[in-house]
Structures are given as C-alpha cells and as structure tokens.
Amino acid sequence: MLFIITSIIPCMGQIIDKISEIKTADFENINDAIQKNKGENHNVQYPDDFLDQFQLIWNKGIAISPPDLLAQSFKPSENMLTRIELLVTKIGNPKDNLSISIRSSLDGPDITSISLPPEEIPTDKDWIEFDFEDVLININQTYYIVFTPCGTGMCYLWWGYDNHNFDSYTNGESWLYTSGEWSTEDFVIKDWCFKTYARHNSNPPYTPHSPIGPTVGLTWTPYSYSTNTTDPDGNDIRYGWDWNGDNTVDEWTTEYYLSGVTAIISHSWNTSGTYNVKVKAEDIYGAQSDFSSAKIIVIVSIDNDPPEKPDAPTGKTFCKVGISYSYSASTTDPDGDRIYYMFDWDDGTITEWTGPYNAEQAISTSHIWNAKGTYQIKVKAKDERGEESEWSDPLPITMPKNMVINKQFLHFLESHSHILPLLTHLLKSYNTKNQISLQEELCLLII
C-alpha cells in the first residue's frame, strides 16, 4: 500500500516555473560547488568526506507499509561511501525504527545499514543523516539506497520528485518493492531526494617493474633508468628510487605520471661498488606500493687523482679579535678538474665546500676570531669527482693581548741609541719570514 502526499503549490504553471528555476540556478550552482570541493580535496591525503551524488528536488512524499520497500539507485564517483542524507518525515507517533541500507543489487544482502528511532525523525520534512560505517564501493557501479520502515503501518514518508519535465538525477532512478518484486515501471516518483557523501580511499599502485637501464657504469657519470606501473584507481603516480638498496627512498621523481606512463630519471654514483637499485610507486593520495625487485648495478672508479696539497693559506698573521681578515689559497689538479676549497679556522669552525674554481685560480675567504690566542689555519681541496687533497700546512696567526708599553725598555733604548740600528735590522729580517709589520714586532718586544 502507498500513501502519497503532494506538496501544495498554487498551480501547475508555478510548479514548472519553480522546477525550472531550481534546475537552471541552484541545481547547477550546487554541482559547481561540489566539483570545486572535490578539486580542492584532490591532492589532500584522505580528506574529510564531501557530497558526491544527490537529487534535491521534491514535489511528493510517499509512505509505505511492510513488506513493501522503496529504493533509489545511484552511481558513486569515489570509492568510499561514508554516509547519506534523505528527505523524510514521520507520520503520527510511530514506535518502530526506520532502517536504511546500501546494496549492490536490489535483492542482494546489505553492504551496510543503520536504523534510526522515531524520535530522530522529524514531523516536518527535513534532511536526516544516516551515518553508517564507511564502506568500500566501486566507482561508477550501480548501488541502491533501500528504505525499510520497521513494524506495521505507514509511519515514514520519503520525499521525491515526479520528474516528468526533466530527469533530475541521470545516474539512477526510484524503485518500489511490492507484491514480491522490484519495479520501476509507471511509479509516480522518478527519483527520491537523497545525498551521498564519499571520500577517496586510495588503493596503492601495483609494484613497479624492476628498473631498466645500464648494469655497469663509471663513478661520477650519470645514467638513465626507467620504470612504470599502474594504479587500480587510475590515480597519478610518482616514483621513489632507492639507489643503494637499503629499502629507503633516496629520491622521488619531481612530478606525478599518469597511470601506466613510463618514468625516466638520471643518477650517478660517487664511489665504486655494487648497488641494488629498487623503486616504489606512490599515488596522489599517499598510498605506496612495495619496492620492485632489485637491479644489480656495478660501478667502477674512473682514473682520477686528487688535487695537489694546497700551500698554506696566505694572509695576515698578527690580528685583532672581532675584525674580519681575508685568507687566500690555490692549488692544481692533475686531471684538470675544477676545485672546491674548505678552510679550518682552528676555533671550532670549518667552512662548507666552496667552488668549483678553475685549477690554480686563487680564491679568498674571510673569518673573524672572537677570542685571543694562537690559531693554526689550514685549507684542503676537492675536485669535481669528490677526490680530496691532504690538508695544507698550517698558517699560524696570533690574537695578542692588549699591548702595554714597557717604560724601562724605552728608557734603555734612549740611553743606548747605538743598539737601535742593530735591532731594526733584526726585526726586518724576522718580518720577511713572518710577514708582520716592524711596528708590530717592536710592540711585541716592548710588551
């Protein structure tokens, strides 16, 4: 038995106008909002659910009594169904629950179901949420929302639309179960009012093929390797490469590839050895495959000599705390490679490698010491292939204490002026070796 309530609208012309207005404005705006929402969530790993399928227009409500049932078919665009909403009303004061279930076929078992007690159903039509356990479903496969009033009597109305003017939901239709069979023929409601919510539960890509590329190579030489796989959900994929066989991704591709498209990447090794190279795939939602089987690659060192040991750095050796001083270095490379330099300032700081510079090109860098004392600064070189030189011999520098004039020594020089030329000669000789000023040496002597 069916109990039908028709919405009260003054005339059919107004009904058609109202439907047309909804179709051309609100209905399309809702579609735009849904697509925007889905687009914004597209690159978010496991986003909150969002509205997926829906039919929002109503002009009739129908109640049924057991054993009759109502149903609405739909086709999801995502693979995780989280909840639904239905436009329903209760009649009078029912004592029995309203049960809603999801099925993959009308006569099949429930995939999931939930019942609400009468007090949770309104006496005026409203959208009521049925929040069941999330279920995995197949994208674009037909499913059914089954409306089952429990107990006896016509206690619950499901509102829908007699869409003889246009099809308000093209991916499904309404169904009635009566006299022991399901039918959609000549039923007064063409689509029920419903909303399905979904999110994307990503299945991981299939394990990629073992990398394809050279199996023997030379150090410091880039080689290209490729792989591909597919994603069961058709999602885009990026690839993570394990270059040394430790089951850790060392490098991800910088872009996502369409499912099934081959990815190519280049890599070089700095040291000789045998490497087990593997690759895994990750889709745009973060689901990852296992690593592929390993490709064994043998890398042989090419003939390469390290740069020559640099000379000791050159620069000022008598310095003051808190002032920046510049020091230079250079060396050559037997293979003509360009060179990087690293300075050790002997105060607990060492520079990063700087370069590369051409062989024999003098380079310069600066440093500030913050404490008085004596420091041994040195430099080493590295060529473009990673071979390092020895550390240079150190250059000693001094951060002296504040100079105090020794009055007795000055009085002695004034009384023995014949000694001053000899002293000046000795200081000049010392200065040639140590590259400090005569004034500085004199000051040292009178401290």
Image: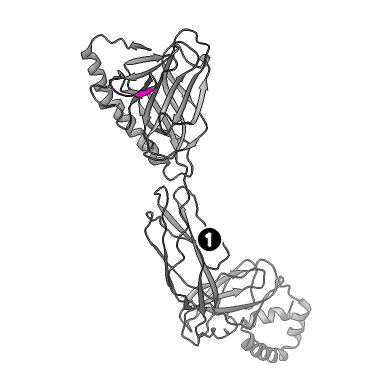
Q: Position of residue 292 (x, y in %)?
A: 50, 62
Q: Is residue 164 magenta?
A: no
Residue furthest left in the image: 13
Callout count: 1
For the question of whether residue 241 can be seen, the reply is: no
Q: Give the left or right position of residue 89, taking residue 397 as reference.
A: left
Residue at image point 49% right, 22% down: 99
Q: Give the left or right position of residue 309, taking residue 424 as reference.
A: left
Q: Which quadrant would residue 437 be assigned to in this image?
A: bottom right
For the C terminus, give its image quadrant. Answer: bottom right
Q: Position of residue 337 (x, y in %)?
A: 47, 82
Q: Position of residue 301 (x, y in %)?
A: 52, 81
Residue furthest right in the image: 408
Given residues 300 and 181, the one toward you in this image is: 181
Q: Amino acid at mark 1?
A: Val
Magenta span main SS: strand
Given residues 358 and 334, the one toward you in this image is: 334
Q: Secondary structure at mark 1?
A: loop
Is 156 drawn above or below residue 268 in the view shown?
above
Q: Which quadrant would residue 439 be assigned to in this image?
A: bottom right
Given residues 375 and 418, the one toward you in this image is: 375
Q: Position of residue 284 (x, y in %)?
A: 44, 49
Q: Is residue 184 magenta?
A: yes
Neighbour class for label 1 at 10 Å: few (<14), some, many (≥20)?
some
Residue furthest front in the image: 180
Q: How is the image coloured?
A: one colour
Given residues 313 and 252, the one toward you in this image is: 252
For the question of whether residue 208 can be seen, the reply is: yes
Magenta-drawn segment? 181-185
Residue at image point 56% right, 69% down: 352
Q: According to the image, label 1 marks what residue?
A: 249
